[in-house]
Amino acid sequence: MTPEEFRRAGHAVVDWIADYWATLPERPVTSAAPPGTVVAALPDGPPERGEPVEAVLADLDTLVTPHLTHWQHPGFFGYFPANTSGPSVLGDLVSSGLGVQGMLWATGPACTELETAMLDWLADLLDLPKRFRSAGAGGGVIQDSASSATLVATLVAVHRASGGRWREGGVDRRYRAYTSTQGHSSIEKAARIAGLGADGVRVVEVDPETLAMSPAALRAAVEADRADGVVPTIVVATVGTTSTTAVDPLPEIGAICAEYGIFLHVDAAYAGAATVCPELRSGHAGLEYADSYCFDPHKWLLTGFDCDAFWVADRGELIEALTVLPEYLRNAATESGAVIDYRDWQVPLGRRFRALKLWFVLRWYGVEGLRAHIRSGVALAARFADRVRADDRFELAAPHPYSLVCFRLRADDAVNAELLARVNASGRVHLTHTRVAGRHTLRLAVGSPHTTKAHVDEAWTLLSAAADTLLPH
Ligand SMILES: *Cc1c(COP(=O)(O)O)cnc(C)c1O
C-alpha cells in the first residue's frame, strides 16, 4: 500500500467509523445471533489475490457490526464502560502509523518521554501524592490493563518481602496477598502467577453496609498469618470495587500496612477517573500510604483500550525486581542511568506508543472537558437512582458514589434475573448483574459520552414496564 493508496483507504475507514458512531443509537446494543454465526459466514481462508479496503469495509457492515455488543452505544450500561473517543482513536492511529517499539528510551526517546510526561500530567490531574511523580523517587507507566498493574505490584511486593531473594531463588517462603471479598479476580490471578500458591490470597471481610474492607478483619488476618510463619506481602485495596464501587478505607488500611511493612497497592481501575473532579476525591484519602496505584483511562476517561495508568512510589525497587539486560539491548543511554527504560516496568519487553492517545485526549478535552464528562455520568446515575428510590417496588442494593447504580426489585433472584433478561431483550439498553449479599442485583453503569437523560430515562421506563408484568398487582 503506497502512501497515496493509504491516504484514500484511510479516509474511507475514518468515514466508516464516523458513520458507525453516528448510527449507533439506532442499532440494537447486543447481537442475538447464536455462537458460530460469524465463523460460518467467513471464507475458509485468505483470498489468493489482494482485495481493496472497500471490500473489507462492506464485510464489516454485514459480518462484524451486526454481531457485536456495542460498547460505545448510548444505551450500553453493562460492566464498566470502556470509553473511546475521536481524539483517542486518532492518537492510536498515529501510534500505529509511527510503528515505534518503545521498549527502551533509546528505541524511541519521545515515546518514553511523552509517556513520563503524560503520567505526571495525570498524577497532577488526579491530585495523587507527590511521591508518584517522576521528579522524585517514583513515576508512572502505561500498562495494558489493571490486571497487569496488579501483577507488577505483586512481583515488586514479593521482591521486597523476600529481601530481594525472590529474583534468584524463587518463592522461598509462604508469602500472602490480602484483598477484600470484593477485590477483583486479577488479584488471585496475579498471586498465582507470582507463585504464591492456591492459598496465596487471603480474602478479608467487608462491612455489610458499605461493602468496604474491614480494617479490623485485615489486622486480624495479618496477625494470625504472622503467628503462622506466613509473610504478609501485599494488600490490594480497591477504590471503586467492580461489583458495586465500594471504597476501601485507605487511612486505616494504610496504617496497618505501614505498621507491618506490607506493600500497599491501590486498585482504582474504574473510579480513579472520577478523581479528575476535586469533589470526587474523598476515596483517595490515605493514598499517601500507597506503594503503587493504578486506574484505567480506558474505562471512564475517553481513552480507548488498552490504557492503564500505573504509578509507583519507588521506581528503583520496581526496576530491581523486573530488570533483565541481555547483551543485545545494551546501549549508552541505559548505561548512563539518565533515562527510563519502560521494559523494566512491565512484564513484556515490547510496548506500543500508547501515550499518544492520552496526549490527544488530554489536549482535545482539556481538564474542563474531562470533568464535564465525569460529572455528566455521575449526575445521570444519581438521576436513575432517584427513580429507583421513588418506586416502592425497587430498592438500591449499595451506595452509588460514582456512576454505577446497583438495584433490584423487592422480589426473589429469579424475578430479578427475568427482569434483566427482558429489559436487555429490548435491544435498546444493556445492563449486567452482580451479587450483593448473596442476592441477584442489577447494575446500571453510565459511562458513554453519548448517554443522555433520555437514554437513562428509557432504561428506567423499560425496567418499570417489565416490573409491571413481573410483579403481582
Ligand atoms: C475492571 C477492573 C479491573 C480489571 O481491569 P483490566 O484493566 O481489564 O485488567 C481490576 N480492578 C477493578 C477494580 C476493576 O474494576
Image (cartoon, grey):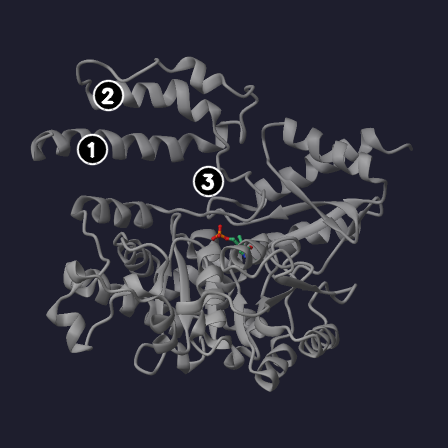
Q: Residue shown at 47%/29% (left/top)? A: 68
Q: Residue at x 47, y 69 (%)?
A: 293
Picture layout, residue 413 above or below residue 26: below
Residue underneath mark 1: 11
Amino acid tagged 1:
His
SS label for mark 2 = helix
Distance between mark 3 and mark 2 Cα atoms: 24 Å
Q: Does residue 311 appear to the left or right of 377 in the view shown?
A: left
Residue labelled with disc 2:
54
Which residue is denoted by mark 3 in the rendering? 72
SS for callout 1: helix
x, y percent for residue 86? 33, 46
Density class for disc 2 (Cα within 10 Å; few <14, some 14-19, many ≥20) is few
Q: Is residue 108 visible?
A: no
Secondary-structure class at tag 3: loop
Asked if residue 393 can be seen in this view, the reply is yes
Task: Kindly give the residue lying farthest to the bottom in the view shown.
Answer: 259
